[in-house]
Image: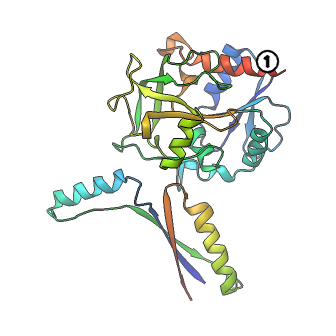
């Protein structure tokens, strides 16, 4: 089992993801520079948070043209696992691997706080160790996390059970008040139709140790590892 | 050949920055501004060797595939000789 963490100029959560895979998942992990294109030895890649290319033009817009992204597309098409966190989610949307877009937060501020996210489906490679309806306490840190998509896309996401995380109250209730950034339908994370590509705005890799205020994010990485182990 | 590209949010997409600007404009004393939408403007200069038709094709592609995100934005291209 081998993991890769892709590093763009401006990525800044790459070491957090690396740390979680090596320490808490206990598996080999490499950094992959965005100019590299060979992903053949990996079972899963993480596109980490940060500000790739300084968020110039639109968050994630320029990273999509990095050489590694063509390989990520083929990697995803081959059924292997891709996890995009925060800026990684933005990049996956810009690259067309996930539908919709992430625009400026409703209240314009950069929001950095712990939120609650409800697991909407356990039927993904990233949530199979979690119970549907369970509530995770995880941090967000973004200025462009406001998920938008058209009505058709939203209907499709719902019909295909592809909304994976939604912002909620501590008790799991989905309310406007619990929506930090204005995201449509409180969406915090979605997956692709084949369910092997997940993008989410919250940072589970920053919530893997009690010392950091929450270890709720660990189950996402445990799910990922369990999926890879089951496929081996 | 020079081209100007205007990228604007689709009418259906909320523009919180435009709203904040509108609010500031109101604080400046103009209280009859109905709406403000923020967009992006690009000036692209092509090398002289690029023929007009090729330039149109190239700039349109640049606008559609790099400068704008079709999920949330529209673009408009203007050329000047």
- Residue farthest along the bottom direction in this orientation: B81
Instruction: Identify the image quadrant of the N terminus of chain B.
Output: bottom right
Estimate the x, y position of residue A70 in percent, counting from the top left.
75, 49
Question: Which residue is nearer to you in this view: A152 or A135?
Answer: A152
Identity of the residue drawn at 66% across and 80% down:
B55
| Whether residue A33 is situated above or below residue A57 in the rendered picture | above
Q: Nearer the viewer, residue A125 or B19?
A: A125
Residue drawn at (43%, 37%) of the image: A185
Q: Would residue B3 appear left or right of B31 to someone viewing this image?
A: right
- Residue at 75 percent across and 39 percent down: it is A76
Q: Quadrant of residue A122?
A: top right
Q: Position of residue A3 (x, y in %)?
A: 75, 27
Residue A46 can be seen, yes or no: no
The image quarter containing residue B50 is bottom right
Which residue position holds label 1?
A230
Report the residue at 49% width, 33% height from top. A188
């Amino acid at each position: 089992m081998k993991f890769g963490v892709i590093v763009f100029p401006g990525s800044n959560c790459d070491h957090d993801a690396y740390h979680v895979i090596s320490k808490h998942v206990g598996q080999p992990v490499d950094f992959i520079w965005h100019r590299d294109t060979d992903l053949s030895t990996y079972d899963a890649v993480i596109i980490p948070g940060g500000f790739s290319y300084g968020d110039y033009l639109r968050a994630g817009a320029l990273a999509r043209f990095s050489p590694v992204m063509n390989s990520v597309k083929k990697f995803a098409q081959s059924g292997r696992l891709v996890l995009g966190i925060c800026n990684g989610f933005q990049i996956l949307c810009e690259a067309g691997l996930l539908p919709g877009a992430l625009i400026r937060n409703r209240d314009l501020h950069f929001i950095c706080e712990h939120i609650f996210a409800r697991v909407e489906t356990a039927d993904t490679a990233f949530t199979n160790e979690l119970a549907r309806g369970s509530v995770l306490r995880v941090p967000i840190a973004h200025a462009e996390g406001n998920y938008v998509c058209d009505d058709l896309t939203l209907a499709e996401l719902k019909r295909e059970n592809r909304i994976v995380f939604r912002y909620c109250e501590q008790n799991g209730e989905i309310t406007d008040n619990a929506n930090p950034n204005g995201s449509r339908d409180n969406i915090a994370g979605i997956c692709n139709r084949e369910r092997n590509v997940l993008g989410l705005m919250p940072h589970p890799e920053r919530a893997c140790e009690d010392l950091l205020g929450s270890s709720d994010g660990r189950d996402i990485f445990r799910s990922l590892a369990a999926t890879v182990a089951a496929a081996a | 050949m020079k081209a100007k590209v205007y990228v604007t949010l689709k009418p259906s997409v909320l523009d919180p920055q435009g709203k904040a600007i509108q609010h500031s404009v109101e604080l400046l004393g103009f209280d009859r501004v109905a709406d403000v939408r923020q967009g992006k403007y690009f000036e692209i200069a092509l090398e002289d060797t690029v023929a007009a038709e090729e330039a149109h094709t190239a700039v349109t592609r640049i606008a559609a595939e790099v400068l704008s995100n079709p999920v949330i934005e529209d673009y408009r291209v203007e050329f000047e000789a």
